[in-house]
Image (cartoon, helix red, strand yellow):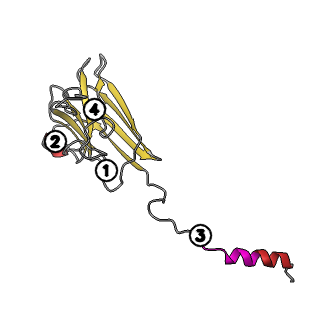
Amino acid sequence: MRVPAFLLILLTAACAAPPAPVQNAKTAPEQSVNLSAAGEFSDDDTAAIAYDRKLAPKGSQASVTVESGHGQTRTSLVAEGLLPDRRYGAHLHTKPCGAKPDDSGPHYQHHPGQIDPTSEVWLDFTTDGEGAGRASARHEWTLDPAKVPGSLVIHAKATKPSGPQAGQAGDRIACLTLK
């Protein structure tokens, strides 16, 4: 088979072109991160544990989902069986739940040292007359797969938005370990 001359020139030019640039890790597609937890708060199961039965009564439960990718992170919380008509704080924490309230570590911060709702995930909510509440948050950053939050902690009070106690929300009353 005879190759026409103009095709031969095109093929030669294409092969002589410089190689395509190598993609480095910074331009590689980001990994998405999906975390979740759900359960009825028990007195001893650290996957879903209650630390304060007055504020997280027997039968109370919650579920949380964290979806991170494409430049943003979305977090949703649904709680049921808590005290009716009450304000609670809720945050993502750095470590899994444990037998003691402080085992879950400090608040997860996307920008370490920055205590505000743009760096931390604040999911404060008010329960209805049945003790159910929900909250969601959206951030314009993604989770690092090597450093994901370990739990969601429900606190006794709403989060203080500013001042010397910014980010504080009272005692830890219940916790869900994220997977």
* Circle 4: element type: strand
What kind of residue is marked 1? Val
- Counting residues from the start of the chain, the first of labels 1 and 2 encountered is 2
What kind of residue is marked 3? Ala
The quadrant of the image that shows the N terminus is: bottom right
Give the magenta range.
11-19
Q: Nearer the viewer, mark 1 or mark 3?
A: 3
Residue 9 in which image quadrant: bottom right
The numbered mark at residue 97 is none
Residue drawn where x is 35% and y is 29% of the image: 135
Mark 2–mark 4 contact, CB under 8 Å? no
- Counting residues from the start of the chain, the first of labels 3 and 2 encountered is 3
Residue 5 placement, left or right of 134: right
On the image, numbered disc 3 is attached to which residue?
20
Place of residue 32 in the rendered image (x, y in percent of width and height, measured from the top left): 43, 51
On the image, numbered disc 2 is attached to which residue?
44
Local packing at callout 1 (Cα closer than 10 Å; few below 14, some 14-19, many 20+) is many
Q: Nearer the viewer, mark 3 or mark 2?
A: 3
- Counting residues from the start of the chain, the first of labels 1 and 3 encountered is 3
